[in-house]
Image (cartoon, helix red, strand yellow):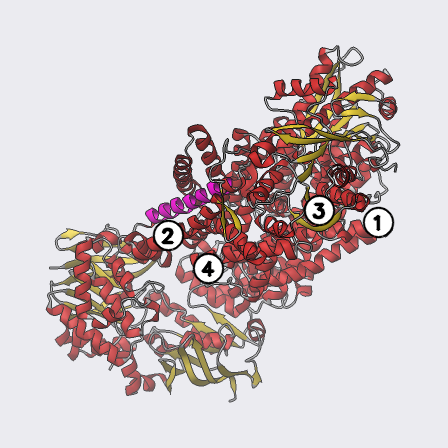
Amino acid sequence: MKKMMLIATLCFVVAGLGTGWADDTIKIGLHVPLTGFAASDGKSSTFGAELAVKQINEAGGVLDKKLELVIYDDQANPSQSIPVANKLIGQDRVVVGVSGSYSGPTRSAAGVFQEAQIPYLSAYAIHPDITRAGNYVFRTSFLGEVQGRAGAKLIGEIMDKKRVIMITLKNDFGKSLAAGFKEKAADFGITIVNEYEYSMKDRQFGAIVAKVKADNPEAIYASGYYFTAGPLISELRASGVNAPVIGQEGYDGSKFIEIAGKAAEGVIITTSLDRDSKVPETANYIAEFEKLAGYPADMVSASVHTAVKIAAQAMENAKSTDPVKIRDAISRISMKASTGTIEFNALGEVQKNVQNQIVRDGKWHHHSVIDDPELLAPPEK
Amino acid sequence: MGPYEISLATGVGIYVILAVSLNLITGYCGQISLGHAAFFGIGAYTVALLSKLGWPMYLTLAAGLSSAGIIGVIIGLTSLRVKEDFLAIVTMGVAFLFVGIVRQQEFFGGEMGISGIPSHGMTKFAYLCFVLVFAMLSILFSWYVKKAWIGFAFDAVADDEGTARTLGLDIKSYKLTAFAMGTSMAGLAGGLYAYYTRFIVPETFGFIESITILSMVAVGGIGSTFGVVFATVLLVMMPEVFRFINDYKLLLYGALLFGVMRFKPEGLSGFYTLLTGNKEK
Amino acid sequence: MMLKISNFCCGYGNMQVVNHLDLEVKKGSVTGILGANGAGKSSLIMAIAGHVEIKNGSIVYNGEDITSCTPMERVSRGIALVPEGRRLFKSMSVYENLIIGGYITRKKDSQTNMEKVFDIFPILGERIRQNAGSLSGGEQQMLAIGRALMTDPKVLMVDELSLGLMPKAIDICYEVIEKLNSLDMTIMLVEQSTKRALQASDNVIVFESGNTVWKGSSNEAKKSSEIIDSMLGLRNH
Amino acid sequence: MAAILSAEAVTVRFGGITALKDVSFEVKQGEFLSLIGPNGAGKTTLLKTITGIVKPANASIKINDREITKLPTHSRIRLGLALTHQIVSPFKSMTVLQNVMFAAGYKKVRNIGLSILNFSRSSEKKDAMAFLEMVDIAQYKNFPVSTMPLGILKRLEVARALAIKPKILLLDEPLAGLNSQEASRLADTIKLISQNGMTTVMIEHNLSEVLRISDRLYVLDNGKYLASGNPKEVMKQPEVRTAYLGS
Amino acid sequence: MLFIELFIQGLIQGSTYAIIAVGLTLIYGLLRVLHVAHAGLFTLAAYLGVTVTNQFGSLSLGIVVATLTSGIVGVVIYRLVYEPILNKPPYVALIASIGLYIAMEELFRLIFGPFGLSFSSAPLQNVVVIFGIHLRACQIITVITNVVLLGILAWIAQKTRVGIGWRATVDDPEMSASFGIDPIRVRYLVFFVGSALAAVAGVLVALLTNLVEPTMGAVPSYKSLAIIVLGGLGNVFGTLIASLALGVIEAFGTIYIGDFLDRDAIAFAFLVVVLMIKPTGLFKSR
């Protein structure tokens, strides 16, 4: 038994090694899912963050110091992200934390950052309770509900379709989108004919498609990620359902188009990255990202890119790496980033325009913008 | 100790309780279970819901422990009917059913899980000690069970049910007791986990988690408490130690699991025996 | 000499079941192996077929030492076994059981052998598509013998031929044994029914607790009370 | 003397086969009864029906006039039955001594509560040693059973059965697989146990040992009662001889 | 009409289950091993199928390469992993297999990347309309492949000497060995055939979804375990029926009881209920 204790202690020690003290850099902590089912988003997140750091350092760094990224894997698992957050805070002494991960791990890490009073930015996790962890937690993307409401406006008003079928992904993302959509559907004259749910692991949707076909809707509001939406939309189109499909930022990326092929044509999504943007921040980002990563930009990477840029800007504004000052600077920030102009409300939620994108000729293109401040207002508490 | 070490050690403590509790069922009593995380989850959800109603911590933990134990006995009834491979797959079914049911019920927070679980009201270090006390208690309890006559009876049930029966042993009540003990301890671990993360989602308690717990037991050496504790510490720490090789972490984990079973099926406690020359039983 | 077994011991693990046996089996003879339950009769023929570990001694078959051959090699040399309890492939048809019996022979030989088996047991021909498990006890025993004949063996060993069979079925099986013997096949019979065994065999060997207590021709055996006593446990009283 | 164990009208069917048909028998206090018969006669099935491992189509089994037919196996055992297995079934993860110790602690594992509260194993160890000595294998006490030869394991079966302090000892082929010296030694041991007052029912094929040590024989053939009575006389009965020697 | 369509969709889904699960149950029937890593071979084949097809433009070549490679890898897994631990308690092989599966999943991610692969132009996507029901060619081919492959398998098992020998080995390995059927060769054969079946399923699923991901084996890995238990472990016919039944139940369940239970839970609720009533599965185990 003694031996085992010894070995266990050794493990602790070894774990402690390899992290030294370095004062010539400023560290930003990032946790992403590098392994497990969400590994692809982890990869995009990493590229997004690396691009931001590269751009900042090439422009002279922050407060005359180089910015350094510390990246850990959280497997998109809420239990894993707690020690990760603690490690970033306690060992790596990061001044800002960024989540490039899903809601579960982000929500549990948010509590840790809040308690340690280190500013924390959630890049694309949508769980409403994340920012409620406290005043050190911010979110640079839309809430699920907000995007759901935008979807309702897109379908009911911009596209003028009224009989809608919902196909909802059964996870926090899909459920909160659905909640927002349902909340505003009636306001835009939408009748929800039926709602079907599927799980994250489903890739074959024959049953749902058959039923949707029988329902014969005018439009389909389908939440999901590229890996579920790709096969779903192929099947819908193959079975002769021609109603327009409206998705969200989960589709955002070239992989969706690659999977769905021709079936992707005409699919519209609500997202925060406008591919045809003339705004230099966005256009520049889209170009630079593809150069670095070797594949086209997506929403996930853009969100993480934005979050890192905001952290850096806040430090410059605060002229300090003191967490309290950074926090205050973030809450007051107003900055143009790759995903739009970022300003936070009292809860730490961002309010920005929703970019609607459409697939044309195998590429994402501008469709329309939703800028109704009332509709897009995130909760204040 | 910094916050990182504390949070890590708290996690280790919770997993020790889980692994030791599964070892009671699978290691001692020989009933393979691929659904142990469900009881972990039952405890966590009970504690999360009750604590949000304002129940004090000691009551919620007791409730988490008993709710998991009661459902554990019900699931244990299946072990009276199906055996070995069939039991493994039924318990696997339990794992999926638990997650499947919880994620569909708004009452349990559905997909969003339950957040805003009240604080345990201690410092992180105090909570670590609190968890470690329970971990020590479960190790002691497990050790006691092994040494008491009940452990002897578990051995007999695990070894050969039919023979144990012809020696006058009431197999059913022993199997159910093993399930009751093991699952209620898992429920307690769930409660401690809920206070630790203060946020729970269904997926945390899924099949993968059950496999993780079973791996700890198997890698440690089925039935050997200290081997299991050692393996738990090792397996929980391993991803941390190897965090600098982020990308290969799970690969190593899988390879370790596979390697131990392939080359040392009696688990790491086999190495321990080899080292010390005495047979830990 | 078909089989020559000398100073032969066999058993399971560290348990020895047959001790220092010497036995010679003439070509075309029928040898009865007698003894109480657990005396080691079955173990002997299972060892000859290669299913029980040989601890000591040798088996010479047709002048060739086969002590260390695998069961399959023995089958291919012409030693066939009808095991105790028959051990048919119960979920498979009569036809399939016979095919397995002749697995190592060429397909053409397999066909002719199967026809021969159907000549001997016409009932099997009628039940060719039926599952072995659904046959009656007598039919199952016939199939087990038939399966053993599929390799065209020179030595046929039958374990507990009459066990669990109706008297009429036993009669039929023994008729077949006689017929096979008349075709110059060498036969070894383990049999609980002493009377049957003495009628059918030319020579007998009697076991008690793994030791040979009597050996000789059937005609002599019929006169010896030793055998009966041994079977009934009365020898030491 | 009254019958300590009785079985009436036992009928057992497996699938379509009738393994036992309307068999009745009883054992008196202190008696040594041997169940014999050719292979497949249904002897083991009868013992398994008595212990409740096999469910009969019809039967009435009594211990000391108490009806036990509906009880589960472990309850029957607790009323005073002990069974040794035809195919030795020691607890393979235990040593020789632990096997017997576990049985000797039968009172401490009667129910969960007792089994949790009881910790000491010293008195069981003492008892177990006594039983191991009784069957002459005390010197192997610390060996794991997996390394033991059959002769030792057969004795272990007997010692373990005795350790639960039964009123009736049911032995299923205790001598099978032993060589003649071993068999005769174990038979002597069994005889001695019986002479000390243990009611014994034994299934055995080694007829010379059976004749030597039994008080009474009970012969089954093809699932039916054939004969019973004084061993030597039974063996002279023509139908018994036919059953054994064939018609 | 909707009912017929749901039923057909269930059969398509069930057919993919069947092809995977039959291989698994063959292996279980022979060796009593719950071969979780079977799903790893399914994924491997899907990757090979897509890669080869994209590289050489020939789906048939992709299928051949995928099937052969997976079959051989299956045999190698048997030889190196299971054979040495066959006489250990059953959980040993089960956990070793789970470990192997995790490692395989990670290897696929490291080699092929986390985003998943798709056909550069997916074959067999043309739509056929039969009595008003739109079906893609690959969907029809899935069902046909299921029928044909299992038909061939049944024919081999029932009519050929190899098949008869194989079934005999499942029944009584010792006896069949004494008649000259080499049990080792039978095991190699079963692993090859079982793995090749998983491979075909992998390529078919790749065609159906046009997406091959490292984690695509996760669902088959446990769902096929449930199926083979329902079908009576080792029983091929039972497995086929259980697969198709589960596919159909899921299809209807998704639409009509999706609010109570998700798709995986439906399968396992069905399983637990059946096993409580009949502890050996719907059909007789072998």
- Label 4 amino acid? Gly
Q: Are marks 2 and 4 in contact (CB under 8 Å)?
A: no
Q: To which quarter of the image does residue E102 belong?
A: top right
Q: To which quarter of the image does residue E177 belong?
A: bottom left
Looking at the rendering, the stretch of residues picked out in magenta corresponds to E184-206
Q: Are marks 3 and 4 in contact (CB under 8 Å)?
A: no
The span from disc 2 to disc 3 (Cα, nearest Å) is 46 Å
> How packed is label 1: few (under 14 Cα within 10 Å), some, or many (20 or more)?
some
Mark 1, residue position:
B52
Measured as percent of width and height from the top left, residue C135 is found at 32, 72
Q: Chain of mark 4?
A: E
Residue placed farthest to the bottom in the image? D1
Q: In this rendering, is residue A24 above or below E3?
A: above
Q: Residue at x 69, y 61 (%)?
A: D117
Q: Are marks 1 and 2 on the same chain?
A: no
Mark 3, residue position:
A164
Q: Chain of mark 3?
A: A
**Residue A201 showing in the rendered view:** yes
Mark 2, residue position:
E153
